Amino acid sequence: MNKHSGAGELAGRRVVITAGPTREPIDPVRYITNHSSGKMGYALAVAARDAGASVVLVSGPVNLPVPVGIEVRPVVTAEDMLKASMDAVDEGCDLFIATAAVADYRPENRADDKIKKSSESMALPLVRNPDTLATIAGRPDAPFTVGFAAETTDVASYAKDKMQRKKLHMIVANDVSVPGLGFNSDNNAVTVFWPDGQEAIGPDTKKAIASRLVALIGEHLKQE
Ligand code: CTP
Ligand code: CA
């Protein structure tokens, strides 16, 4: 293992990774979020570090230790995640990997005080959040971009559609309907798609999947 030696497949590369969920506040005590432990993103950050990259990890709220040698920039909301990611890419970035489970919508208004219950039903107006991955992939100076797609049906076709729509170099598709894999688990199984190929990885530990993903991304990055 070439730990921090800079001799691996991402030697000298600057990598920015998003990980974890975002939290969108409703009032001071409540928020909207997604299932996400952050484990896949943190495992990828460690694998990229071990492959010689310098890594910035833009992380939503997770219960994971800060990995040695990785700069973690904590964020809460999707808007924070976009800003922190754009700033990190501005500082120099060869490879951007989005593993975060971003809330697609946020409450239109955040109440300053706790909302008290009153009627038998209530409606909460939501507005669309910015898409960090699509925004970075759409920059004129876009780095090599890799997205993740967590799907429950038609995994391959939804994932390939996202890759095209967001103008990504690669997408990692995750079937989150399989019990015991994905979300909170230490294990996962994914299929990686690029415009003219694909590769299935796992089921395996997130650590093993991360190191194969980094090797695969490294091969494609070299061809750019
Ligand atoms: N993503 C992002 N910012 C968002 C939404 C998604 O950066 N506001 C990124 C995710 O980190 C992931 C990829 O886009 O790498 C795909 O996320 P996903 O939720 O699967 O796709 P969406 O485009 O949001 O489509 P939908 O949820 O409707 O399937
Ligand atoms: Ca989404």
Image (cartoon, rainbow, N blue to C red):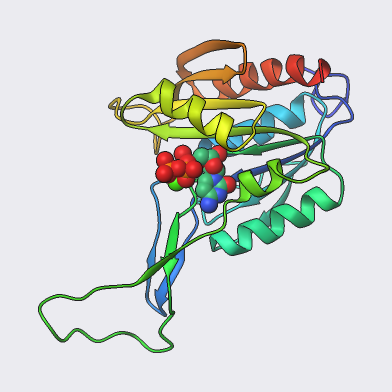
User: In which quadrant of the rendered view does residue 130 lie?
Assistant: bottom right
Q: Nearer the viewer, residue 145 or 212?
A: 145
Residue 108 location in percent, x, y?
A: 43, 74
How many numbered circles are shown?
0
Residue shown at the point (78%, 21%) measured from the top left: 221
Quadrant of image for the C terminus: top right
Q: Nearer the viewer, residue 72 or 197?
A: 197
Residue shown at the point (66%, 49%) measured from the top left: 135
Residue 11 location in percent, x, y?
A: 86, 25
Quadrant of image for the N terminus: top right
Q: Nearer the viewer, residue 26 or 38?
A: 26
User: In which quadrant of the rendered view does residue 68 lie?
Assistant: top right
Question: Is residue 100 visible in the rendered structure shown here?
Answer: no
Residue shown at the point (83%, 29%) measured from the top left: 4
Q: Is residue 16 left or right of residue 33?
A: right
**Vertically, is 116 above or below 13?**
below
**Vertically, is 39 above or below 153?**
below
Residue shown at the point (57%, 30%) measured from the top left: 163
**Vertically, is 19 above or below 164?**
below
Q: Residue furthest left?
A: 120
Question: Is residue 148 visible in the rendered structure shown here?
Answer: yes
Residue 112 location in percent, x, y?
A: 43, 88
**Vertically, is 101 above or below 79?**
above
Residue 72 location in percent, x, y?
A: 70, 51
Q: Is residue 172 left or right of residue 185?
A: right
User: In which quadrant of the rendered view does residue 193 lie?
Assistant: top right
